[in-house]
Amino acid sequence: MEDKKPSSDSITFLGTAGARFTVTTQILASGGLWLNLSGTEILIDPGPGCIVQSTKRKLKADKLSAIILSHRHLDHSADVNIMVEAMTRGGFKRRGWLFAPADALETEPVIFSYLKSSLEGIEVLQEGKSYAIGNISFATPIRHIHPVETYGMSFKAEHAFSYIADSRYFDGLCHSYSGELLIINVVMLEHKLPIDHLAVTDAERIITELKPRVAILTHFGMSMWRAKPWEIAEKLSQQTGVRVIAARDGMRFEMDSLEEIA
Ligand SMILES: [Zn+2]
């Protein structure tokens, strides 16, 4: 008899909206990324609707070990309080960790003080540091260029992967991240205004430089959405030779699928 194969590590995209208009209109859902890494469940960037999108998909917040905020902007943090309440079973069970940059916790904290005591702890994200959540570890290699303190993350798990959160392009993005999978927040089709977000040409540069097995684009603003992200992804695949996927609301990416790609 064969042993039952443990289920693959996975990443669920609770939403794919980024920046203001796709989020405020909910043309696309928002809500962040839900990781299941060898049974350790981690929520990244619980934007507006996270509680709705996660419960709808039968993801259980009381199984979460940690919530990580890349930065304090609303589209990444709006549901952090309700998700902490859900993670800690209404505040009755002291459990779970919150990771966030200092400026999300200090002057005007994104987390209510009455909820803090229901957490096991809060860790401040800093440039160049590594953190552990059970058997999983992740690093925040470099501070991004964004109006508030922002970090992306590199995870060490069965399959290494990185999440490049909001930033203006700078060479440090290519030098700091690695992994078989790259998740990139690509808000804009083109740079029209000096906005501290990545556009498609930046994504192309990053993918060409880092050559992951798969790159997933997400966090779409209006210009990206109108241009049909799946068509942009197809074009980028041809240009870079890397398999590029546009995330869809609710998409669950199985990390084992990386093994099928040479
Ligand atoms: Zn932002």
Image: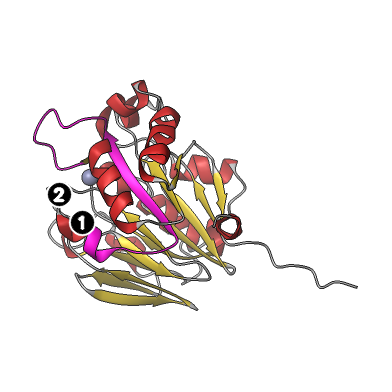
Q: Residue furthest left?
A: 194
Q: Is residue 69 visible?
A: no
Question: What is the x, y in percent for residue 239?
Answer: 36, 39
In this rendering, the answer to whether 72 lies above or below 52 is below
Q: Residue at x 21, y 30 (%)?
A: 190
Question: What is the x, y in percent for residue 189?
Answer: 26, 30
Name the amino acid type tagged 2: His
In this rendering, the answer to whether 12 lies above or below 158 is above
Name the amino acid type tagged 1: Thr
Question: What is the x, y in percent for residue 154?
Answer: 35, 65
Position of residue 226 in the picture relative to residue 93 (left or right): left
The yes-or-no answer for disc 2 within 8 Å of ligand 1 is yes
Residue occupied by mark 2: 146
The yes-or-no answer for disc 1 within 8 Å of ligand 1 is yes
Q: Is residue 51 visible?
A: yes
- Alpha carbon separation for disc pair 2 and 1: 7 Å
- The local crowd at label 1, few if under 14, some if 14 to 19, many if 20 or more residues have their Cα within 10 Å, is many
User: Which residues lie in the magenta part?
Assistant: 174-197
Position of residue 107 in the picture relative to residue 59 (left or right): left
